[in-house]
Amino acid sequence: MDLTLNTDIGKLNIRVAAWIESRNNILVSKFPSGIISLPGGRVKFSETTIEAIKREVLEETGEELYEIELFSIIENFFLEKQSKKDFHEFLFVYKGKIKKRKKYSGIDNSNQDIIWETLDVIKDLRPNILNQLVGYKNQSNIIHLINKD
């Protein structure tokens, strides 16, 4: 069961995303709607965020994530257009590495393409606040951002 809590005034989500770079490229999820995001998804009940990011990357790419480190925590507040519900989301962004391939075939990538893009694509990632993470390298501090859309 995903860690999503419905309330009378909105939804609370806990999610993870993987920031995977290799030679001036970043691994992204491209959806048929045109949305581009980092690979990842919702944390499941009783699952740690590290377990969740390993599971999500494996499900979406078929590859094991390694050299994992917490990079950023984003508090994301937005209105979902379809449901017209307010969301309060905690997004844990992990840096890591996977085996580089031209094509990935995980068990959970049927509604998205997992592909390498040049780092220029970061400006198009959702949520937009992810572009503020550009240029941060392995630092000892976790980057905390707040996004209100």
Image (tube, rainbow, N blue to C red):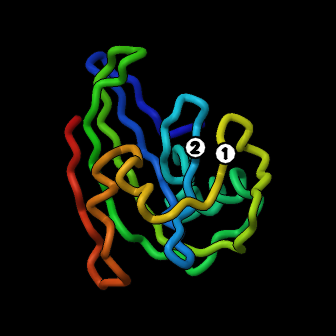
Contact between labelled residues 1 and 2, with CB atoms less than 8 Å apart? yes
Q: Which residue is mark 2?
A: 30
Mark toward the start of the polypeptide (2 vs 1): 2
Q: Quadrant of the N terminus?
A: top right
In depth, the one of 120 and 89 nearer the eye is 120
Q: What type is the residue that disc 1 sits on? A: Asp
Q: What type is the residue that disc 2 sits on? A: Lys
Q: Point out residue 121 in the picture as x, y percentages from the top left corner.
A: 44, 55
Q: Point out residue 36 in the picture as x, y percentages from the top left corner.
A: 49, 44
Residue at the image point whose x is 31% and y is 57% from the top: 131
Residue at the image point whose x is 33% and y is 15% from the top: 84
Instruction: Give the vertical position of 100 relative to 81 (above or below).
Output: below
Residue at the image point whose x is 20% and y is 50% from the top: 146
Number of callouts: 2
Disc 2: CA contacts within 10 A as few (<14), some (14-19) or many (>=20)? some
Could you say whether the residue bearing mark 2 is in a helix, strand or loop? Answer: strand
